[in-house]
């Protein structure tokens, strides 16, 4: 399996979360990458964070989100970031994090996180109106989709099995 660099940036191009993950394949939902328990990620130049659980990540083509699917025991099952569409190259995926997150916990609770940051950054970074509208529309769609639609129900589990 080849390794792929995952790079999230903020709207001002400042480095945000980044890590190396293993390429697991591509299907109708997008590109799947995975990382075993014990892998590390980093926000900007802050100290690295060791992930206690295996996780896989979906990078859809031409959509405004990415999604992380965590193995147990992590209480967050799905963590979807609202982003600009992912840019793909042979060994790097990159996107702009637009602050809004849709989180699904293992108990089925779904909520939107960082709406305050989204509102603040609309002003700070002068998000264009179409970016604001598309981010909001994607977020609202994801709130329902993470509990009712694939790949959020079972598809991701086949990829998680590859990385455990």
Image: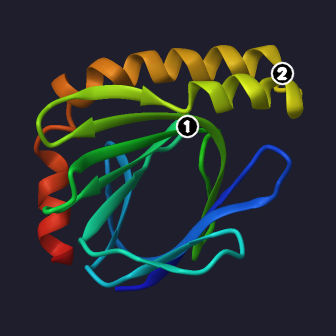
Residue drawn at (21%, 76%), measured in percent from left and top?
163
Taking 65 as reference, is 105 left or right?
left
User: Residue 158's quadrant in the figure?
Assistant: bottom left
How far across and how far down the image is residue 57, in percent?
37, 58
Which dot marks residue 77?
A: none
Residue drawn at (35%, 26%) of the image: 111
Q: Which mark is residue 62?
A: 1
Dividing the image into 4 quarters, which one contains the N terminus?
bottom left
- Name the one closer to the observer, 47 or 91: 47
Dot in front, 1 or 2? 2
Q: Nearer the viewer, residue 26 or 126?
A: 126
Q: Secondary structure at mark 2?
A: loop
Q: Name the residue rendered at 13%, 55% in the picture.
A: 157
Which residue is located at x 26 percent, y 36 percent?
Answer: 104
Query: Looking at the image, can residue 108 be seen?
Result: yes
- Compared with 52, 142 (above or below) is above
Q: What is the number of callouts on the image?
A: 2
Front residue of 151 and 19:
19
Give me the C-alpha separation between circle 1 and circle 2: 18 Å
Rendered location of residue 56, percent (x, y): 30, 62
Q: Is residue 6 visible?
A: no
Q: Identify the residue under disc 2.
A: 128
Q: Earlier in the sequence, mark 1 or mark 2?
A: 1
* Label 1 Cα neighbours within 10 Å, binned few <14 / some 14-19 / many ≥20: few
């Amino acid at each position: 399996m080849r390794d792929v660099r995952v790079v999230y940036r903020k709207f001002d191009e400042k480095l945000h979360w980044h890590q190396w993950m293993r390429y697991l394949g591509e299907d109708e939902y997008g590109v799947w990458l995975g990382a075993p328990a014990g892998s590390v990620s980093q926000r900007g130049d802050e100290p690295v964070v060791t992930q206690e659980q295996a996780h896989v990540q979906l990078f859809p083509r031409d959509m405004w989100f990415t999604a992380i699917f965590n193995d147990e025991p992590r209480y967050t099952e799905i963590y979807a970031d609202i982003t600009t569409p992912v840019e793909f190259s042979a060994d790097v995926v990159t996107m702009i994090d637009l602050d809004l997150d849709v989180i699904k916990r293992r108990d089925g609770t779904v909520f939107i996180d960082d709406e305050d940051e989204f509102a603040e950054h609309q002003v700070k970074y002068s998000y264009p109106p179409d970016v604001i509208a598309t981010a909001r529309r994607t977020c609202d769609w994801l709130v329902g989709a993470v509990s009712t639609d694939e790949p959020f129900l079972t598809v991701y589990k086949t990829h998680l099995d590859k990385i455990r």
